[in-house]
Image (spheres, helix red, strand yellow):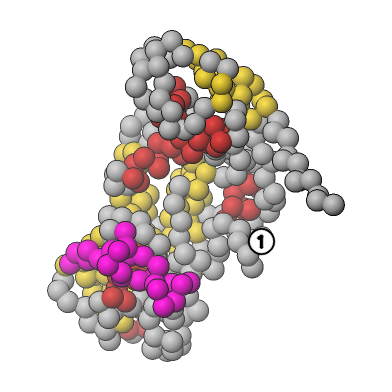
Amino acid sequence: MTKPPPEEPEISIARQIVLIVEEDGQRVDVWLTGQLPDVSRSAVQRWIKEKLVLINDHVVRASQRVATGDRLQISIPAPIESVLRPENIPLDIVYEDTDLLVVNKPAGMVVHPAPGHSHGTLVNALLYRVPDLAGIGGVLRPGIVHRLDKETSGLLLVAKNDPTLRALQAQFKAHQVEKRYLALLEGHLTPDKGRIEAPIGRDSRHRQRMGVVHNGRPAITEYEIRAYYGAFTLVDVHLLTGRTHQIRVHFAYLKHPVVGDTIYGYQKQRLSPPLNRFFLHAYLLRFTHPADGQRISVESPLPSVLQTVLDRFLA
């Protein structure tokens, strides 16, 4: 006997709204996103897929175009409770107001829960610090705007509500956020200033790694040498794009990998004593505050463990 298909979970509806189209031509998902500035386009597309959007009492497709006089009925689903749990983990907050905060993430802390890292993450800590963080696309979870690798320390921007999140994401997309890092590289890099333009994508031979590949996404990294320390080079890095592992991949591509990076660099560290992390720190973040248009600049000094490495060369 054939088993009946499993029932889809019932969607809880928070409220319904009705909108009338005054000018035709746009795709329905684009038009709705414009009418609902606090809702992302991906959320609207999900509502359409879940048949929560009707035009003139008929189910629509995301690619369907609206016409003047169309009546749209939208059933807005209630937020989905997050499975994430708040944890009382100390956080180094370097800037905070009613809309956003900047946290100085330590090396060794994972940003998002993932297999093998179900707790102790930055997200768990943020949920404890700011329990009423607004939802993103209907899911109650913190508004992480960008990420840092586990063993990279430094400044991370977090939105406290959905409009702020969307505004900051738009700034990142338009390259209006300035992110600078300090990195210690293997060898003596030349010239004193440079620009690395090399596309980054999934490494075909090692699927867990990224690499410079011809069909990758465009990636641009600028750098300026701060100083040479023995057989190493300290560089100030300016990211113009935000690809996964971008700094680590680009400098490994130049044969000057980040010190401590045993994935893209040397399997055995050349520092003595060796670091148990990357020598990579996000020290500066500049962005425009969505609320008042003011330019915000936040800095974080090198962690003591990294500063100690440099001080050894000067002793």
Pick out the residue farthest to the left: 191
> From what the image shows, is residue 274 above or below residue 291?
below
Q: Position of residue 255 (x, y in %)?
A: 27, 81
> From what the image shows, is residue 187 above or below residue 130?
below
> From what the image shows, is residue 60 above or below residue 214?
above
Q: Is residue 17 visible?
A: no
Pick out the residue farthest to the front: 1
Q: Is residue 29 visible?
A: yes
Q: Which residues are magenta?
A: 194-217
In magenta segment, residue 202: yes
Q: What's the amino acid at mark 1? A: Ser
Residue drawn at x 41%, y 78% as measured from the top left:
205
Count of labels shown?
A: 1
In magenta segment, residue 95: no
Q: Quadrant of residue 12?
A: top right
Residue drawn at x 31%, y 82% as measured from the top left:
186
167 lies left or right of 139: left
> From what the image shows, is residue 110 above or below residue 47?
below
Identify the residue position indicated by label 1 in the image. 118
Q: Position of residue 146 (x, y in %)?
A: 44, 52
208 lies left or right of 309: right
Seen from the viewer's position, the closer of residues 199 and 129 is 199
Of the 4 image quadrants, the one containing the C terminus is: bottom left
Circle 1 — which element?
A: loop
Q: Position of residue 184 (x, y in %)?
A: 33, 75
Residue drawn at x 33%, y 34% as measured from the top left:
294
Residue drawn at x 46%, y 14% as measured from the top left:
70
Mark 1 surroundings: few (<14), some (14-19) or many (≥20) residues within 10 A: few
Q: Position of residue 78 (x, y in %)?
A: 66, 31
